[in-house]
Image: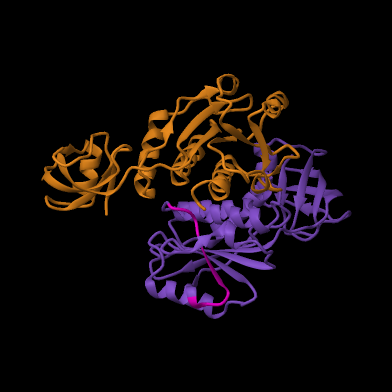
Chain colours: A orange, B purple
Amino acid sequence: MIRLFVPHPLAPGHAVPLDADQTHYVRGVMRREVGDEVLLFNGRDGEWRSEIIEAGKRACVLAPREQVRPQASGPDLDLVVALVKRARLETIVEKAAELGARRVRPMISRHTNADHTRIDRLRAIAIEAAEQTGRLDVPEVADPMKLDRLLDGWDADRALIFCDEAGDARPMIEVLTAPLTQAAVLIGPEGGFSPEERERLRALPFVIPVTLGPRILRADTAAISALTLVQAAIGDWR
Amino acid sequence: MIRLFVPHPLAPGHAVPLDADQTHYVRGVMRREVGDEVLLFNGRDGEWRSEIIEAGKRACVLAPREQVRPQASGPDLDLVVALVKRARLETIVEKAAELGARRVRPMISRHTNADHTRIDRLRAIAIEAAEQTGRLDVPEVADPMKLDRLLDGWDADRALIFCDEAGDARPMIEVLTAPLTQAAVLIGPEGGFSPEERERLRALPFVIPVTLGPRILRADTAAISALTLVQAAIGDWR
């Protein structure tokens, strides 16, 4: 069944208009008509079986009929990731949504070589991936921030799992044994972190350095592998 | 340093010619000259620091000088993956190389909707990913085979880790506790396995059903997550 994210409240009696892209998808691509059903979620009110009550070429309106799942969210897990090249960053956002990250925080470090990105495009990808993967919330995509500023303002209650390719760090699966209330995974740019950045990271009390095996991983692979291991070890994959 | 796979023997005294693409990369893109060094590997003789001894526009010849790493390979781990859409299949092959799979075996099942693929292109991607990730062998990419035929000829000594999205399977991290000498990960098409296929798979003695968490994963995500968990739990990430 079609599954769509909407910003509107979901409750009986609230008519929910779709936006232009969603209308095109539901009507033009999927050929749904008045009376057909669609699943809606908004990140607050759970998932609703909803009926199409108006279906024009330019407008489509739904009526929420029944809540089929109450609102829920996965572990409080962020992904802090260097601005890598556009295609890989888009993959990373899609995968972060599938793997249950709550936030994606693009980061600029010394060796980051992508100096611009379209955050609105990343946010659209996050919504689409959330729709497809069946989650009830959409991961937030934050505005890019410099690594130093991000660390200056870090909440020390959130463990920062630092995927350190240069070091003698321990395997994630050995390190992550006790549950973490709040965590974040940190993935550097393809050029890695600078010696100064590594030194600062490893000296911070909330940073947990881990290794992701003996081979060099691209940033997208590292992000997916690290989020997988956190979910499998201490997240909602158990 | 540039790192290239070559089919030729690597030993002192053996001149190694690069092919046209490699010559273009080394000369035209990376601007290397006679006397510069490149790392070579061939999947048999380890990794060799090699010197450029001839550098024309159309031909480039290297002389292996010193073995810097002896031949080694990771766990005997295969990825059996449904023929999914071209871009995702290419991603999967790249990631299988990074994550240390020894073979990628494309598979055709009931709900497989991609009916053709360029295996030669996948093999080129496997080589390029092996060069970048630093491994000393290149994962083999087999010709596509129907699932039934593949299971008919399966070596029962190789565990087949079946990522079963429909079922009540246990988390991979709980299931994989003892080392496996030979293993394979099985990833179905985006439409999943048919009920008959699932039934057959779950009845086979070498099949280990596992779950990859509560969300729906795309085939590329599932492949990367599953290979990650095998390497982390019982492979060379420990």
Q: Nearer the viewer, residue B87 or B168?
A: B168
Location of residue B162 in the rendering, given as x and y in whole percent from the top left corner: 52, 66
Q: Nearer the viewer, residue A143 or B28?
A: A143
The answer to whether residue A237 is seen in the rendering is: yes
Q: Which residues are magenta?
A: B203-214
How many numbered marks, from 0 up?
A: 0
Q: Name the residue: 59% across, 28% down.
A: A112
Residue reaching furthest to the bottom: B152
Q: Nearer the viewer, residue A56 or B215?
A: B215
Location of residue B142 in the rendering, given as x and y in whole percent from the top left corner: 58, 67
> Which quadrant of the structure image shows residue B190?
bottom left
A101 left or right of A30 in image: right
Q: Name the residue: 71% across, 48% down.
A: A214
Q: Nearer the viewer, residue A93 or B95?
A: A93
Whether the magenta-drawn stretch holds residue B213 is answered as yes
The answer to whether residue B124 is seen in the rendering is: no
Whether the magenta-drawn stretch holds residue A202 is answered as no
A129 left or right of B157 in image: left
Q: Name the residue: 33% across, 38% down.
A: A43
Q: Quadrant of the N terminus of chain A?
A: bottom left
| Residue A121 vertical placement versus B88 (above, below) | above
Location of residue B215 in the rendering, given as x and y in whole percent from the top left corner: 42, 51
Location of residue B83 in the rendering, given as x and y in whole percent from the top left corner: 46, 62
